[in-house]
Image (cartoon, rainbow, N blue to C red):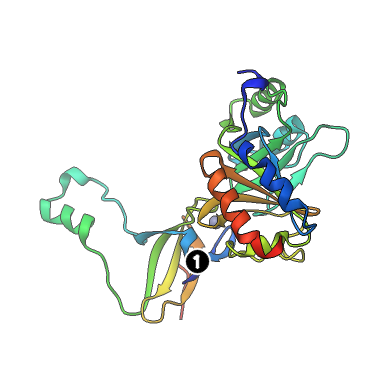
């Protein structure tokens, strides 16, 4: 499929997101087609160092944390999903072949799974001064920067939809299943009424 | 709503979890050797204490891992959580 044929699950919301941004309180930004790779590996087997070299990013060992590449070596973020599971995030149209090859080489004869799940979730940036208040309408987690600042992530529920939250300097990336994205966007715009 | 401390993710709302019944129910070593009654006991019979009860939970909306919790059935307090494979901790 060519890039021209792809359609964001949130394409229909562009105008309403723009209108919401005029308040200065909130910015809702559709970030479609970002590369997402699900990595499963038992790091007890001693392959972590090789994998980290292959990806150019450390695999965060602490639950609900994120690691990112340093400038120059690419643009990858690795979020913790479970004790043997990570989500590797990258820009749209990332060249995946070299990553897959490097990971397989680093794995040797150990079991490692790296699967492209980019089509599963789309990314929505919820940013601005009232971003945290908005998410608090439908999320039980404490999202205060002292607890959930940059470097933190969580799999949780937002308005009864399963999401991955990744803290950003000015807000949050909300990764939501493509089929739930329109529902969640409608919910966010409704919950945001008092801030617009 | 219960606040359940996932041993991986930390405290989360009960709605993020699925219940998995009594913990530490061992699968029979040789199921084929069991009588129908013994098999039925393994499948369907569970403890029903008033007080501390070790049970399985799955953090289905989070890390999706199974773990065990000791919950007091009288007051719903979670006395302990521990990862699969770890022994049941001693609780008051
Ligand atoms: Zn968890």
Residue labelled with disc 1: B81
Task: Choose between B87 and B1: the one closer to the eye.
Answer: B1
Which residue is located at x 57 percent, y 44 percent? A181
Which residue is located at x 60 percent, y 64 percent? A137
Q: Residue furthest top?
A: A2
Give the total of numbered labels.
1
- The subunit letter for the residue under badge 1 reads B
Q: Residue furthest left?
A: B36
Judged from the image, the secondary structure of the residue bearing numbered disc 1 is strand
Q: Is residue B16 visible?
A: yes
Is B41 on the left or on the right of A55, as rendered? left
| x and y percentages locating residue A196 in the rendered image | 71, 60
Which residue is located at x 50 percent, y 56 percent? A160
Is A155 on the left or on the right of A126, as rendered? left
Which residue is located at x 51 percent, y 40 percent? A179
Query: How many residues crowd mark 1 within 10 Å: few (<14), some (14–19), many (20+)?
Result: many
The answer to whether residue A58 is above or below residue B70 is: above
Task: Choose between B48 and B13: the one closer to the eye.
Answer: B13
| x and y percentages locating residue A76 in the rendered image | 75, 36
| x and y percentages locating residue B38 in the rendered image | 15, 55
| x and y percentages locating residue A153 in the rendered image | 67, 53
Q: Quadrant of residue A142?
A: bottom right
| Quadrant position of ligand 1 | bottom right
Q: Is mark 1 within 8 Å of ligand 1?
A: no
């Amino acid at each position: 499929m060519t890039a021209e044929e792809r359609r964001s699950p949130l394409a229909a919301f562009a105008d309403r997101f723009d209108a919401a941004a005029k308040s200065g309180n909130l910015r809702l930004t559709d970030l479609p087609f970002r590369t997402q790779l699900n990595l499963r590996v038992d790091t007890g087997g001693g392959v972590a160092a090789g994998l980290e070299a292959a990806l150019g990013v450390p695999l965060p060992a602490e639950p609900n944390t994120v690691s990112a590449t340093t400038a120059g070596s690419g643009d990858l973020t690795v979020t913790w999903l479970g004790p043997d599971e990570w989500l590797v995030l990258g820009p749209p149209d990332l060249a995946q072949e070299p990553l897959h090859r490097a990971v397989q080489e680093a794995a040797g004869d150990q079991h490692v799974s790296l699967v492209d799940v980019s089509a599963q979730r789309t990314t929505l940036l919820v940013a601005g001064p009232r971003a945290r208040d908005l998410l608090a309408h439908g999320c039980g987690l404490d999202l205060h920067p002292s607890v959930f600042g940059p470097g933190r992530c969580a799999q949780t529920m937002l308005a009864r939809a399963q999401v991955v939250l990744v803290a950003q300097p000015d807000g949050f990336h909300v990764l939501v299943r493509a089929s739930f994205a329109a529902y969640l966007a409608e919910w966010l715009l409704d919950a945001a009424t008092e801030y617009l | 709503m219960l606040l359940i401390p996932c041993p991986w993710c930390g405290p989360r709302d009960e709605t993020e979890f699925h219940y998995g019944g009594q913990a530490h129910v061992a699968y029979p070593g040789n199921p084929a050797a069991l009588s129908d009654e013994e098999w039925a006991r393994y499948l369907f019979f569970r403890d029903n204490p008033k007080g501390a009860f070790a049970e399985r939970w799955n953090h289905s909306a989070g890390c999706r891992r199974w773990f065990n919790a000791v919950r007091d059935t009288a007051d719903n307090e979670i006395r302990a959580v521990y990862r699969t494979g770890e022994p049941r901790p001693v609780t008051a």
